[in-house]
Image: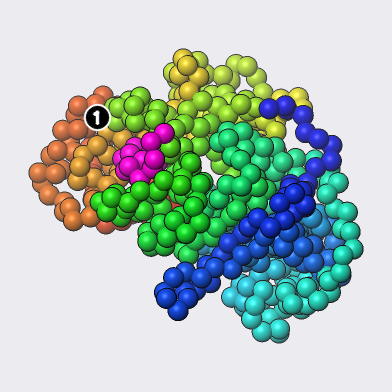
């Protein structure tokens, strides 16, 4: 992919083009109940309807005083209005602020205040919280409620549609590539949530990278199980089908609803967190369910266990793969690998403790491995580079890599390295690059366990224990004792399994069989690991460390 970005670009420009060329094709489909026969009933917007509705909402927002560049909190669950409002804000050149509501009220407040929004568009529950808790009281000047009573906000969605009627040309697609397009907050699973600044150039190159990486064609159907990724559907010319689920709880999804949506609409593209694939695969494989319409399955948010990948491939047609791209809110995609390679080549190495293979870097992106450091690295230096096979921190640079966090100069300083006009992003993940150029993930930098004798990395250590049939997953944590970190392995068992002395002895035997795990002397059984709120897949090892410390006491 060409590193240069067009001077004028707006990711929302895809929508009017599709509305002009394929006006009657479905853009978004949303389940709103059941019909008399008990079948799912759906509402929808065609590309022409979505384009027209987003135009009307943009004109309505302009009429009530929303100006281009205004940071605008959008707290609306996945629905037809969510898609229309997002495209309306992009067309208007406002800056949507998107934060996971699942992170909880206590953590939401600081994120909202940090974003300093001038407008707040939300469902009634969010407006009530805003009023009671005083969210953004100093900065918000414009409020819109999506549903609920009028008194919750200055304007309703109906007000916007009434004011935005007509056909006046917005003329908003000629946006500078480096102009702010959105602020997307990280999940905060391994530290405070931070708002990554996306420009219109970031979005445009990201959409094109995904199109090329997965050979996505206009006319495909995407199951939008994750709202932010679901927004790429219409931009890529796909129909976005919103399934009936709580998007903040993918680990608790009801599998028949996912399978029904895939069958109802002939879904060709499924993006799902590892937790969602695990739950659906465990349900569907014993029933002999097949999903022949799927052309690809994409799963990200945390390392996807090979067992989960293998189980889900049994549902797919021959030749259809489960892809596990690597990336983060700040940079996606970075690398990619498919189930054929995982199951035939890299799985055995992962189980021996070599790390999780992430595949080759995505074309158009530069990836390097630098020496592990917890300090800022202001400027790039070739001496930072680690040789192939040695563990360091992944750093990436390219057209869809974000350049800063909003209103977080210290976090930006820690995460970015300046190399002339290029900005490298430090992923916060450790791993290595092998001789063939493939990346291998060994864990989060902040979660490594440093003892006086050695450094233990979470993924290589945990993988060897995860091979035990009674083990669902494990988590290596460090507990501080006498000024030093003591490695402790937390163990979550498969459903129906119980801790026992025999099981403990078997885990100890696995430990003794591998040189890189022999420092682990303490094992603690945990009923159910805490996980991130976005994908329900990243283990909150920091919380487990606190729990383990209390147990050791």
Q: Is residue 531 above or below residue 342?
A: below
282 magenta-colored: no
- Residue 138, position in %: x, y? 75, 68
The picture quadrant where one finds residue 164 is bottom right
Q: Residue at x 49, y 74 (%)?
A: 33
Q: Quadrant of residue 396?
A: top right
Q: Examine the image and state in which quarter residue 131 appears.
A: bottom right
- Magenta stretch? 304-319
Q: Is residue 443 visible?
A: no
**Is 252 located above or below residue 209 in the figure?**
below
**Left or right of 158: which side holds 391?**
left
Q: Residue at x 67, y 23 (%)?
A: 380
Residue 299 position within the rendered picture, expressed as x and y whole percent measured from the top left: 46, 44
Closer to the camera in the image, 22 or 445 = 22
At x 35% / y 45%, what residue is drawn?
Answer: 315
Residue 501 lies, in percent from the top left, at 10, 46
Q: Quadrant of the N terminus?
A: top right
Q: Is residue 268 left or right of residue 468?
A: right
Answer left or right for 455 relative to 226: left
Element at label 1: loop
Residue closest to the far left: 502
In the displayed structure, does residue 441 sit left or right of residue 522?
right
Depth check, front residue: 184 or 41: 41
Q: Nearer the viewer, residue 154 or 62?
A: 62
Question: Which residue matches tag 1?
Answer: 518
């Amino acid at each position: 992919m060409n590193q240069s970005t067009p001077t004028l670009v707006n990711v929302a420009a895809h929508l009017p083009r599709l509305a002009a060329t394929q006006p009657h094709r479905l853009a978004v489909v949303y389940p709103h109940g059941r019909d008399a026969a008990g079948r799912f009933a759906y509402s929808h917007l065609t590309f022409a309807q979505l384009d027209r509705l987003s135009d009307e909402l943009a004109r309505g927002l302009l009429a009530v005083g929303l100006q281009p560049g205004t940071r605008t909190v959008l707290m609306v669950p996945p629905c037809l209005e969510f898609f229309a409002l997002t495209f309306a804000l992009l067309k208007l050149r406002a800056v949507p602020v998107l934060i996971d509501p699942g992170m909880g009220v206590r953590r939401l407040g600081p994120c909202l205040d940090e974003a300093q929004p001038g407008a707040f568009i939300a469902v009634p529950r969010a407006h009530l919280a805003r009023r009671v808790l005083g969210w953004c009281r100093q900065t918000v000047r414009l409020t819109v409620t999506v549903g609920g009573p009028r008194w919750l906000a200055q304007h309703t969605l109906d007000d916007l549609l009434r004011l935005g009627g007509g056909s006046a040309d917005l003329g908003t697609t000629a946006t500078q590539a480096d102009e702010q397009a959105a602020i997307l907050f990280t999940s905060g699973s391994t530290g405070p949530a931070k708002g990554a600044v996306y420009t219109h150039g970031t979005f445009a190159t990201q959409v094109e990278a995904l199109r090329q990486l997965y050979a996505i064609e206009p006319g495909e159907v995407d199951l939008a199980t994750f709202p932010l990724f679901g927004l790429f559907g219409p931009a890529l010319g796909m129909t976005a089908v919103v399934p009936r689920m709580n998007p903040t709880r993918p680990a608790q999804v009801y599998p028949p609803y996912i399978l029904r949506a895939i069958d109802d609409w002939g879904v060709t593209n499924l993006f799902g967190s590892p937790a969602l694939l695990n739950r659906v695969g465990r349900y569907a494989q014993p029933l002999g369910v097949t999903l022949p319409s799927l052309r690809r399955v994409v799963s990200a948010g945390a390392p996807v266990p090979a067992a989960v990948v293998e189980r889900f491939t049994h549902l797919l047609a021959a030749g259809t793969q489960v892809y596990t791209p690597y990336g983060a809110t700040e940079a996606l995609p970075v690398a990619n690998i498919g189930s054929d390679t995982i199951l035939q080549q890299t799985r055995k190495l992962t189980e021996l403790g070599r790390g999780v293979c992430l595949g080759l870097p995505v074309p158009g992106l530069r990836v390097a491995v630098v020496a592990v450091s917890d300090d800022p690295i202001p400027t790039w230096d070739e001496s930072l580079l680690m040789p192939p096979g040695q563990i360091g921190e992944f750093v990436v640079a390219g057209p869809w890599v974000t350049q800063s966090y909003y209103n977080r100069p210290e976090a930006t300083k820690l995460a970015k390295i300046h190399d002339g006009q290029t900005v490298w992003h430090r992923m916060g993940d450790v791993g290595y690059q092998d001789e063939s150029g493939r990346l291998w993930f060994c864990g989060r930098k902040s979660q490594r366990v440093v003892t006086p004798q050695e450094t233990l990395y979470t993924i290589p250590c945990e993988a060897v224990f995860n091979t035990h049939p009674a083990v669902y997953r494990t988590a290596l944590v460090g507990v501080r004792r006498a000024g030093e970190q003591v490695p402790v392995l937390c163990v979550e068992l498969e459903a129906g399994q119980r801790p026992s002395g025999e099981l403990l002895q078997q885990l100890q035997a696995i430990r003794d069989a591998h040189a890189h795990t022999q420092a682990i002397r303490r094992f603690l059984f945990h009923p159910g690991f805490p996980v991130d709120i976005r994908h329900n897949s990243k283990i909150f090892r920091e919380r487990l460390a606190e729990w383990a410390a209390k147990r050791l006491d």
